[in-house]
Amino acid sequence: MTIAIAIVRMRDLLAVSMLLGIYGLLSASFFVAMDAVDVAFTEASVGAGISTLLMLVAITMTGRTEHPGRHKPGLALFVVLITGGLLIYGTLDMPYFGSADAPIHLHVAPHYINDSMQEIGVPNIVTSVLASYRAFDTFGEVVVIFTAGMGVLALLLVVRRPEDINKIDSLNDSMHKEYLILRIVVKMLIPFILLYAFYVQFHGDFGPGGGFQAGVIFAAAIILYAMLFGMSTARRVINQSVIQFFAAIGVLLYGSIGVVSLLNGKSFLDYSALSADPVAGQHLGILLIELGVGFTVASVMVIIFFNFEGRRDISQNKEINKS
Amino acid sequence: MLMGLYNYWAVVVLMMIGFYIVIAHGNLIKKIVGLSIFQTSVFIFYISMAKVDGGTAPILADGIEQYSNPLPHVLILTAIVVGIATTAVGLALAVRIKEAYGSIEEEEIQKKDNLDC
């Protein structure tokens, strides 16, 4: 909470985004304390990793300091205090923290906790709820992520001409000679990060993990590579159109599993249609769906980063040409 | 007696900090940061509701009776990833605004718009 207050005070946006990273890490550890290991996993990789990175890239393009400007803090503070007071008044009727008989624990949650082992056969309840009971919601969320990726693409896409690539290449090579140790260490680390992402992907049934986390970790490995070896090298390794293809494949995989179960006479995304044994069908369905989620999340994150970086290269080149 | 509600108050305070940043600051990037603080406060709200005293993480194992509620975890898990995707769209918009107006301060953008009409 103190960090949040510090964020309000700071005008230097670089420091703000660093504090935001620390804030993300702290809330991740808070989530562990609240038993939400899956959520903590996601928050640690997203809040402390990717979002700080995106903020930094955006700041390099938009300028670092915030203008003092003519704020009207009095009025804003007044509105905020009124709203906060009303919200606190509202909490007086809320159930106490940690009480087991709160309304939230009485409806569907006992069913998930007691029966998911027989129905789905997956120890991690979060995974079975995410990918089976509420698969429809998750499908919607994957589509939202895909759409956001397309939005960034539409806003920031730059078509680069071949002669540009050679120029940027020489620029990058000269820049990165200095970070030799960093580059060698990262080169050794990247296979392990990728391996870990696959472990998280396929072990999500039994421990914390799943497609969302694995996708973010996978993307982090690629982004790390792109940061240290230059964008043009990374582009040569991973073609952007291939990534876009994979983002679409992920959504398609998810949706087509739903259609398969529909064609087999069950409802949309009812995996018991996939196999003669319902529990085996559930296993297969969850595996495939998590794979679809992982594909989409990883590729959308990489798309977002690549496009931000591509934009930045262009604007930097313009400045170099001007001076 | 009221001590049992402190988690909600922490959430309200965080939420109001985010809200304050959004309405009182003119810098678009700062506004996005404020929105993400607001967002995190909602995450914390959900997760703290899911906590049961004496419960453990919702991964089934032998010999454990009490689990925390898995449902809010699922909702927030996906919300975090969707949140970063939408934040990225917001940042992309800010970058384009910077290119078009040369500034991401709300007042300067307003001034330029007024000159144009």
Image (cartoon, rainbow, N blue to C red):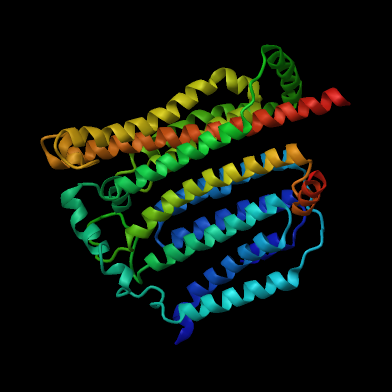
Residue located 50% across and 51% down the image: A43
Q: Is residue B60 left or right of residue A221?
A: left
Q: In the image as oriented, which residue stretches furthest toward the front?
A: B117
Where is the C terminus of chain A found, in terms of image quarters?
top right
Residue that extends furthest to the bottom in the rendered view of this protein: B1
Residue nearest the viewer, comparing A110 with B63: A110
Q: Position of residue A126 (x, y in %)?
A: 32, 52
Who's the residue at 61% across and 62% down the image? Answer: B18
The residue at the far right in this view is A323
Horizontal relation, residue A208 to residue B20: left or right: left
Q: Position of residue A131 (x, y in %)?
A: 30, 45
Q: Residue at x 60, y 30 (%)?
A: A306
Query: Which sits in the foreground, A146 or A28?
Result: A146
Picture residue at 61% right of the left edge, 31% below the top: A307
Residue A313 lies left or right of residue A235; in this view the side is right
- Whether residue A104 is visible: yes
Q: Nearer the viewer, residue A217 or A281?
A: A281
Give x and y (percent) for residue B98.
74, 41
